[in-house]
Amino acid sequence: MASHKVYPGYPSNSTVKVKQVYRTSYHFQPKKHWINDPNAPMYYKGYYHFFCQYNPKGAVWGNIVWAHSVSTDMINWKWLKPALTPSKWFDKYGCWSGSATILPGDKPVILYTGVIKENPEPGYQVQNYAIPTNYSDPYLQNWVKPNINNPILNPTQENVSSFRDPSTAWFINGYWKMLVGSRHNDRGIAYMYKSKDFVKWTRAKHPFHDKPGTGMWECPDFYPLSSPGVRNGLETYTLGKDHTKYVFKVSLDETRYDYYTIGEYDVVNERYHPDNITVDGWAGLRYDYGNLYASKTFFDPVKKRRILWGWCNESSTTEEDIAKGWAGIELIPRMVWLDPSGKQLLQWPIHELETLRGQKKNIRNVKLNKGDSMEIKGITAAQVDVDVSFTFSSLSKAEAYDRNWDKFPREDIAKDICGIKDATAQGGLGPFGILALASKNLEEYTPVFFRVFKTHVKTYKVLMCSDATLSSRNMNEYKPSFGGFVDVDLADKRLSLRSLIDHSVVESFGEGGKTVITSRVYPKLAVAGDAHLHVFNNGTETIVVEKLHAWSMKRALMN
């Protein structure tokens, strides 16, 4: 996984010929080179703006600038020139991640991390701000980093090499407030800073939130939630104004996953308190139990929704990335809202993605007995959106949950079980699901599936897996089996799965977005027109494909 690693042995190459074989068709990515963290998504004067970390000189991390694109639908994009490039003493060695805040008067401002020295590794970090040169330009094509007041934050007691990623700010009780990620030894920390004028900032008396044993906290994000089950989002500036629940998210540098908790905001003491039902640490809730990192949300004022962006790194080798001329994609923007239970978030691809749907295949009420696999024909299997609902008549054949599995590291239990109980391991109620990016004779495939277990206290655990182990004959790739449990009531004996398959990415949403898993895969045989899609069942309980809709997807515009 990528971090702030420099590759001095790999020369910059802006003229490399880009290989198209694994490039996505409807996910966000540049024409060539490296991208990582999404930065400062926002809506301004009729356009969605998206910024991300970008290396304009090669397919490895380094030479980081802020790439900038605009869109009217967050699916089709127009690329502009970089918004921020290293040009001042306070960002000489990099313009790293940050956020955007819209100030009164409809005036956007960017907060970002600047690197002023290369040592100590990965760099000496400060916080800066930038503003547009022309507020009337809806494209916001030019930004200035004022010499006066920059940096707005210098580390004093903070760790100078672990002090980054300022959050979107909010205004309450006469002060603007923002968070910056950090650590002290193995303790992850989000510091709060406050300002009356958005220029002169002071640190709060104590951390906004911290947790021992979690390591560096990158890309902190904090936002309010509507009532359980309500899909409408809330503006960040409403933080602390009579809302009962909030999301606090961090990206853990040591695990390369994004974790969130749901809790309360103590405005008086300027602290965040996770709910007792939420695990606060490596075993906590994740946006995605697969390949997603450094996520960032924003409030869409047009559709009144909270939107999540997340970076999806490659699972190929650095040498392969350089050879193909690009690395990194951004996952499809997702709506996020509070589940009716109040215990977790739900996530779902923005509905604008549906404008790319083309030829459609419908299937209803097809039985799958043990060992059955049925190909879904008539669609472009390498570039497809598939939504399927499975039903079963009984829970009686669910396998017993092995209590020895609870001895696995708590944060890895689901992942480890998926590795043991893969799609080829016959079961009772499951495994059943789809085989994505499958070769003609199934030498390669990526299964996304469910398996139901019965516990010793006669409750049920639903496991969802996305297993890249057999995805490619290429032995050099990182091909993990990812997994997450799905908190679902099985009273109606039904489970749903939606997968966005796009050449080298399989982005899957279980049970309406309760559990999401993304895999990166690089098949040698199941490429383009040679890719196939199947539904399958390898359990003794008969599964019914109640309904399946699959759409060939058109290519998004990335001009």
Image (cartoon, rainbow, N blue to C red):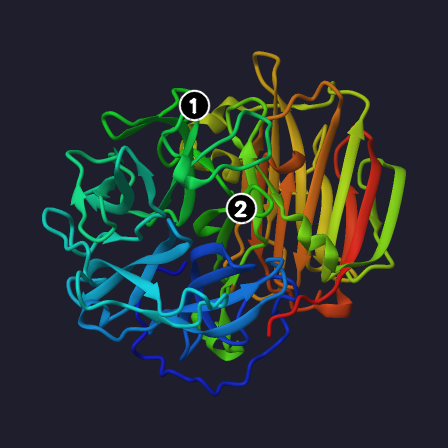
Picture quadrant where residue 24 is located: bottom right
Residue 201 coordinates in the image, percent (x, y): 18, 48
Is residue 467 shown left or right of residue 543? left
The vertical placement of 161 against 267, above or below, is: below
What mark, if any, has residue 301 been given in the picture? 2
Residue 530 coordinates in the image, percent (x, y): 77, 67
Q: Is residue 476 visible?
A: no
Lower position in the chain sequence, tag 1 or tag 2: 1
Q: Amino acid at mark 1?
A: Thr
Is residue 154 shown left or right of residue 197? left
Residue indicated by mark 1? 244
The residue at the point 70 percent across, 40 percent down is 497
The residue at the point 44 percent across, 49 percent down is 296
State the separation of the CA atoms marked 1 and 2.
Answer: 21 Å
**Secondary structure beneath disc 2?**
loop
The vertical placement of 126 against 17, above or below, is: above
Say which quadrant the N terminus sits in: bottom left
Say which quadrant the C terminus sits in: bottom right
Residue 282 coordinates in the image, percent (x, y): 37, 37
Instruction: Pick the residue in front: 336 or 428.
Output: 336
Eye-nearest disc, 1 or 2: 2
Instruction: Pick the residue in front: 301 or 361.
Output: 301
Furthest residue toward top: 457
Residue 223 coordinates in the image, percent (x, y): 42, 38
Furthest residue toward bottom: 15
Using a 10 Å C-alpha cutoff, classify the residue at mark 1 as few (fewer than 14 neighbours), some (14 to 19) or many (20 or more): some
Picture quadrant where residue 433 is located: top right
Instruction: Pick the residue in front: 30 or 478.
Output: 30
Picture quadrant where residue 131 is located: bottom left
Q: Amino acid at mark 2?
A: Pro
